[in-house]
Each structure stands twice: as structure tokens, then as C-alpha cells.
Image (cartoon, helix red, strand yellow):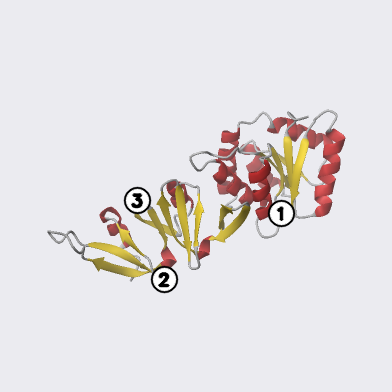
Amino acid sequence: MSDAPSILIVDDEPVARSRLRELLADLAPEFPHRIVGEAPNAPEALSQIEAAQPQIVLLDIQMPGMTGIELARHISARAQSGETPRPMPLIIFVTAFDEFAVEAFEVRAIDYLLKPVRAERLRQALARALTRMPQEHAQAIDQLARATNTRRRHLSVHERGRVILVPLEQVVYLKAELKYITVRTKEREFLIEESLTSLEEEFSDRFVRIHRNALVARPSIAGFERVMPQGEVDGGDPYWQVVLRDVTERLPVSRRQWSTVKNLVS
């Protein structure tokens, strides 16, 4: 049984989770498996994925607070970031979407189950999931998110065994430091393991690059100030730095990025 695939059930409705458990129990003779947990929401799901590392996630789409597709985007980002990427679980969506939305799944070879879920359809989806390559699956999840215009509205921070969802609207800047990204809000700093380049691509409408190691939220830019270096024999070259709203830090603007950012404040 130790080699049996591990499964996490994610659905905000207890009745729906119970139904999937019953169906999985019925399928156990022909599809041995281990249910490693249940989660009623996105933060709990992310915590359990980090702790239990399930191979398969049965993920409801219509959940309050964060949809299943947005949650899947967090999971794929986590799996594709950092020096040591996390295992990418194989996601099977559970949905009541109409046929037009379902096309987005089929084109990208992402499996889905229409409610009410049937045992035979669940068995087929589980068997197919185990044939997929995790890295290709992560990329398909990203494509699905773009096709359905689903964007992350938070950054997921894993801190002391729990997951904190930081709303993007609260982020002042993102700064790359060694293998981590510092996420600065008005109140505090967080650390995440993601690529600054991928964050720039995903959130280009909100953040602007001011330096090779820093992205700043456009609404957080209060202005710029010119700095004359002190203590240099030749005086040094002056440079510009960003004045930010809500925090006291000043971040330098590289010469390369100055032409892009100088017109952001009228």
C-alpha cells in the first residue's frame, strides 16, 4: 500500500468531500490509493500539499475566497520555483462549468470531473493522471490560468509550517536577495522562493522593474530623489532612488531602468 498513489481532496463543501471519499473507497480494489487529507479552502490545501506532498489533488473549482484554478496556479508556481522545486501534484479539477469553459481543459489535456461525479469517470481520471509528466502538467496549469483569465491575487508565503496569503494590493516592492524574494508590505517583510523574472511577467501591469534585483508596485511610487554619493574621492556619480508610500526605505534605480520609470510620477 505504501506505493499506492496519495490523494488530497480539496472542496469547501463537506458533503462533496464525503462523496469523493465514498467513491474512492469503492474504487480501492482496482485503484489502490491513500487519502492523505482533506482541505476546505486554499490556505489549508497549500499547507497540506507542503506537508503531505500528495501525488494527486482532487480540486473543486468553485470555492469562496479563491477558485480552484487560482489555487492551482499557486501550486504550479511553488513547484517551478526555488533552487529545489517542490514535487508537482497532478491536479484533477471537479467542476460544474459549462461546455465552453470545459473546452479550455480538454485542449490542454487537463482532466476534470463534472458534478455529480461518477465512479467510472473518477477511475478514468485517476488512471490518466498517473501517466502525466509533472513538469508538463505545471505548464498546462499555467496555460489554463491564462486561457480562463485567472490570475493570482495573492502571493503564498510558507512560514513556520503555515501558509500566509499576502494580497498583491498590499505589496510595496519585491526584491531578490540570494535565493529568496523579499515581499515588502506596509507592515512587514515576507520571504518567498519564486523567480523575480516570472513575477515580473505575471504581474507586469502592477509592478515595474527599477533595478535588476527589484520590482516596485506602481501605486506605491510617491516620487524620485537624486542622490549624490558621499565620501568618494571623485565625488562619485549621482543616481536616482524611488521614494515609496507607506515605508521609509529608498530603493536605487539603475541607469538602465531610469528611462522607463522616470515618467511614472507626473
Q: How crowded is the residue under tag 2: few (<14 C-alpha within 10 Å), some, or many (20+)?
A: some
Near-viewer residue (45 or 221) = 45
Residue 78, given in percent of the width and then of the height, sits at 56, 45
First in sequence: mark 3 or mark 2? 3
Q: Is residue 82 left or right of residue 248?
A: right
First in sequence: mark 1 or mark 2? 1
Which amino acid, by three-letter code, is at mark 2?
Arg
Q: Which mark is residue 245?
A: 2
Residue 151 visible, this angle: no
Residue 131, given in percent of the width and then of the height, sits at 67, 28
- Quarter occupied by the N terminus: top right
First in sequence: mark 1 or mark 3? 1
Query: Which residue is rendered at x = 47% and y = 51% of the image?
Result: 199
Which amino acid, by three-letter code, is at mark 3?
Arg
Q: CA distance from mark 3 to mark 2?
A: 21 Å
Query: Which residue is rendered at x = 75% and y = 51% of the image?
Result: 11
Residue linked to disc 3: 212
Say if mark 1 contacts mark 3, CB within 8 Å: no
Please state which of the two labelled residues, at mark 1 or mark 2, is closer to the viewer. Answer: 2
Q: Is residue 240 left or right of residue 42?
A: left
Query: Which residue is rendered at x = 86% and y = 42% of the image?
Result: 22
Q: CA distance from mark 1 to mark 3?
A: 38 Å
Residue 224, given in percent of the width and then of the height, sits at 31, 68
Q: Name the element at disc 2.
A: loop
The part of the image, by quadrant, that contains residue 152 is bottom right
Residue linked to disc 1: 62
Query: Which residue is rendered at x = 27% and y = 63% of the image?
Result: 240
Near-viewer residue (184 or 12) = 184
